[in-house]
Amino acid sequence: MLSHGFEAFAVFIFFIFISICPGTARADYTTPHAEVVCQPGRNVALIRFTLTMDEDPVGYRRLPTSVDQGLSATPTTGRSNCTMVNGWTIRLRDGQDQAFGYGQGGADPPAFFSLWIAKRKIFSRKEWKPSYATDKKRWLIGMVIRPDRLSYCHVVGDEAPDKGPIVCLDEPFQLNRYKVDRVEYAPSGRRPPVGTILLTHGTTEPRLCRKFLRLRQEGFENVSTSTNDNANVFPTDTAQQDLDIKVATIEVSPGVRRKLVRWSGTNHYFDGDVMLLAPLAADPSTVLKESMLDDGDTFSDELPSGWSVISGQLPRLYPNVSRRYVHFDTQRIDGRLYLLAQPSNRDQRPTAVLVRPLADGFKTICVFQRVEPHF
């Protein structure tokens, strides 16, 4: 079972905690859990959900016996698959939206699940845990599955899901209304394992891309959550005007040098990097201003002659993502500098794009797509 965004959430809470209590290394964090239980000898199954604090053991609430005939009393199984007596297979996959260190409820995103019954997808990314920012906290803590109906059990209130009255409602269910999911239940070998990195349309130098993957053992982690400089291009002591701007001198081709300017942000409005190439004599502090970040088509028009932009919102580089929400990392391959782009929102596709800075722009080299869990 999966918990998207949990790692980022835990790290965020850790830094908040140690900043308040520097004398301790302990951090408070929460973990969502979900599992499925089938009742032996009966056509009844249960999917259930809970949230634990720190290293507390996983424990699910008991549902009314009139709803589940005592099935929720089953000890924790940790299972995501089981089979009912009639042969129906039950498959559960749970996840959590990406956590962000800003915005109302950003560090406590909602959790969701997908459910398959007899190979048919019944729910896709259905929310069971609301975000911290939700005014009315309505938690789904269990769902009982029978051949003719589904019973939903919720808890509402500030003390949910551990405390508060449980309210269960029935809904008619007809399996034949749903189609077999040919993606989830594809023939063996047809779908690469989750986590596999694929080269997709737009890749121009596949051999170099495969070398990059060998060099980059950590994959693409953290590119979209921090300002990385894997090639150590930028000095650590450069910051111009009130903007987070760093400048380095790079060679874009033999004998041709440019200033590489990195304009970065890690807040709600600007969580990304805008990379710029400028003449060696250029002074970025006199050119760049916050108003240029506003979405629109005039960014390049506001730059002096000889400047070029590498950012989101450009053809061949996340054209549908704002320039404010694509991060870049640096990487050297065979002595040459490349930039790895990845959107701040991990739901955006492709997973990452590797580009080569040129004297007047960039060239797309690799387009990477990571095989993600199917929801």
Image (cartoon, rainbow, N blue to C red):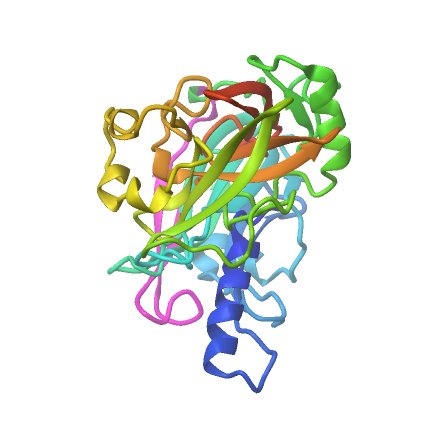
Query: Where is residue 11, by image quadrant?
Result: bottom right
Front residue of this view, candidates 152 and 325: 325
Magenta part of the protein: which range? 151-176
Q: Is residue 27 left or right of residue 343?
A: right
Where residue 9 appears, as percent x and y from the top left, is 50, 58
164 magenta-colored: yes
Front residue of this view, candidates 244 and 129: 244
Q: Is residue 352 left or right of residue 134?
A: right
Where residue 157 appears, as percent x and y from the top left, is 30, 67
Query: Which residue is at 46% across, 23% downward?
Result: 317
Q: Residue furthest front?
A: 281
362 magenta-colored: no
Q: Residue furthest bottom?
A: 23
Residue 83 in view, yes or no: no
Where residue 285 appears, as percent x and y from the top left, is 33, 47
Residue 374 in view, yes or no: yes
- Is the residue 163 above or below the residue 176 in the image? below
Where residue 12 appears, as percent x and y from the top left, is 49, 63
Query: Which residue is at 56% across, 52% downward?
Result: 235
Query: Which residue is at 74% across, 40% downward?
Result: 217
Q: Is residue 264 left or right of residue 10?
A: left
Query: Where is residue 87, by image quadrant?
Result: top right
Query: Where is residue 82, by image quadrant?
Result: top right
Q: How many numbered markers are drawn?
A: 0
- Is the residue 65 above or below the residue 222 in the image? below
